[in-house]
Structure formats: C-alpha cells, structure tokens
Amino acid sequence: ARTPWAAPTPNNTCWPGYQPVWNCNLTTWLGTPPPQSTVDATGMFTVNKVYNALVHEDDPTNVLRNEWGGTCQQGQLLTQGYEQELQNGQAFRDAYVYQGDGDYGHDSKMRLLDAKTLFDNIADNIYYRSDDDQRTLMSGQIVLRGLLQQELNAYYDSKKQHPLLNLHVADRYRDILDANEEICPRLGEISQRYRKSTDYQAFLQSKEYMTLQAFKQNVLGGGKANLDCLMTQYCTDREIPTQVDDFDGTRIGTNVDDYYSNEQQEQSNSTDGGEIDYGTNLFERLALQDAMGTNLLYMADNNQYAKFAMIPLWKEMWYHIKSATLDPEPETTTTPATDASNDVGDGDDNSTNSDNASAASSSSSTIPNPAKFALFSGHDTTLLPLLASLGVWTRQDFWPPYASSMLIETHEINFDGNTDTS
C-alpha cells in the first residue's frame, strides 16, 4: 500500500516564495515496554509526540523553526490521509474477516481471518512491515485498525490492555521498500546509463519538455513545481501560483506524444515578455512531466531498473506468498524473485546479479513464520517499481493515487474434494 495525503517531503523548493506553514492536528503516540530488571513496573505514560518545540507564533520568520514552520513533521500523514487508510482497512475487513461459526457476511471463498481466534496467536494471522517514515508507520497502523476495529475493542474490554503486534522495520537509509541506490550501486549504473540514452535525451530535448522548463524558469522564477509540490498544495486547498492554477479536479488529459516530437523549443533567457506561448492545462502538464521522468526509467530496457530495485522486496513478499502453497520453512533454492536478476542484466557485468540476489536473501533471513495477512506499508515509489517489475505498469502519464493498494491473494482450488493451491 502507498501512503495517502501527507505533508511535503523535505528539500522541496517548489517556486520562489514557497514558505508554507504546515500545522498538524494528527500526532504520533509513543509507548515503551517495562524494564526487564524490575518486577512491578507495568505503569507508564503514553507519550503524545508534538512537533511544537521550535514553533514561534509571534515570529514566523524565526530561523529556529521546523522545516515547514508549523507543527507538521516533514512528510507526515495528514488527517485526510488517516480517513483514507481507515476506509482501506474497512474494505479489507469486508473481504477477509469472518466469524468462525457465524454468518460470514461475504463471499465464503474469502475466509481468511477468523475473528474468534484472531488473538490466540496474532503473529500467525498478521504480519506488519513498513519503512521508518512517519507516514508509512501510521498508515499501516490505521489500516490494521480499520481491519480489526471490533476485535480490538473487544480485546481491550476483556483484558484492559491493547494487543501487542510486532512492526518489522529497518534503518531507513538501508531499507528496500523503494529503490535504494546506496545499497545496490548497480541501480545507479542502470540509471546513469539510461539518462545518457537516446530515448531519454529525446525526452529532455522535446518541444514539450523544453517549453515547460522555460515556463518554470521564466514565469515561476525557478523551482521544481513537481508532483509533490502541486498535489500537497492542491489537495489541501493551499495557494498555487496563478499561472499554474488551472486545474479544477477534472482531468483534461495530457498528450504523451508531445514528448516524442522532433520539434525543439527555442529557449529564452527573458522573464517571459510574450516570446513563448506556453499553452494551457499547465498544472496537468507539469505533473505529467514529473511522472514521466520516473516512469520512463522504470519501464526502460525491459523494466530493468524496477526489477533490480524490487528483488529484495519481492523476496520478502514471496516468503509469505509461497507459504500458502509450499512448506512454511524458508526456501534456500532459487525463487521467482531471485530469478528476476537473471532477466535484467545487460551482459556486461554478471557479478552484480549474484550480489543483489545475496542482498535479497539476507533481507528475509530473519523473517518469522509467515502470517495469513501480510501488510507492507510503503510509497508510490514502492508500488510503481513493483508493478513495473511484473511488466504490468505501462502508463507513462499516470501516477498511483494517494492510498493506493496492491493486493496479492493465494487461493485453494477444490475439485470434487481434491484440493490444490495456486
């Protein structure tokens, strides 16, 4: 699943004068386990993590301030996103949760989590994986709340405490829920080679790309004006430069073919004295330009970059998938995830394939017994390469909407009493 509405990520210079103040009502609660050295130490505070230590309401220009001025953490989940993920969890509940001996209330073939025995061994039923970003951590928690709200309430009413669920996480800069060129230098090599390719250079030199670059420089005065800038402002009713504020929520559509024109745009060093006609529908066109830059990389050369990037994550997910069809012990032979490395090499360096396969193997070596429901909470840059690595992401002009999910189900087929898993 990718995260829903969130505050902007850091280091985004969207346009000159872009100094938004983001205040958040949604906060993170923290709890700590009791010390093992003390027998009677069950009491504790639940700590409310509030980002207001550097807020100076009387002087908003004070340099001692959070990145976005107010009480929002960089890239943190917003209240609107909370509601989106809650709805996701409730949709999963409708599909997968049932009462052991009662009315199932949904398709009987979708019986996955028995509400009556759910907490007998929670690890056998729920596996929760996220990276260490606030918005992904909280998004996963909210999905699970929507999935099991009634059972969570009943558990607390009975035991006067909340159930404990392990969250499987790693150091953020080492994690593999999106492409990580730091731990896989091969990805950087693939990226650099593609950016020097004829196809990518044609994209950069197309009339549409050059027109929008000139628009950002001459009209907006520089800045990125990328998807993160545009959507975080638009979706929270914040101010957008008037020259870009031409989107009313209904997609007009953009023409990918404009990026494959042989015509080239004459560049201007002026501040736009009318020399260039930038056209209309600029909000969507700027969004498309940003999306295409990433999509083209993921889809180039038989999805090579996406396949390499997602090998370790596919290895983790495959462990849970195959447990429903094979023996539950960790597999030591080649899996489909590691097979992908054999399909994406360019023939000039086979050593990297084994290096990345080794990284994939080590990433799952400590995973506990697989669960019936495994939730991986990630980003748009998790879903995109996952889908691209399967060859099913073919839209250059599209981006995963907020709170999107990718579902993988395993089913048992019963023919006249003979069962088979597939």
Image (cartoon, rainbow, N blue to C red):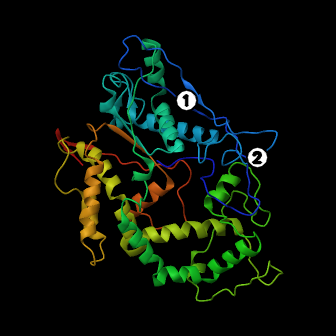
Residue drawn 72% across and 48% down? 63
Q: Earlier in the sequence, mark 2 or mark 1?
A: 1
Dot label at residue 61: none
Residue drawn 27% across and 42% down? 366
Task: List x then y, in percent, for residue 177.
Answer: 41, 52
Q: Nearer the viewer, residue 321 or 221?
A: 221
Task: List x then y, in percent, for residue 279.
Answer: 74, 76
Identify residue type, mark 1: Trp
Identify residue type, mark 2: Asn
Task: List x then y, in percent, for residue 238.
Answer: 74, 51
Q: Secondary structure at mark 1?
A: strand
216 shown above or below 311 = below
Residue 69 seen in the current view: yes
Task: Give the residue at mark 1.
Answer: 29
Q: Is residue 359 left or right of residue 290?
A: left
Q: Nearer the viewer, residue 204 or 288?
A: 204
Q: Nearer the viewer, residue 100 or 122?
A: 122
Task: Give the residue at mark 2.
Answer: 62
37 shown above or below 111 = above
Q: Quadrant of residue 360?
A: bottom left
Residue drawn 79% across and 39% down? 57
**For the residues marked 2 and 1, what is the alpha-carbon distance in whole angstroms?**
28 Å
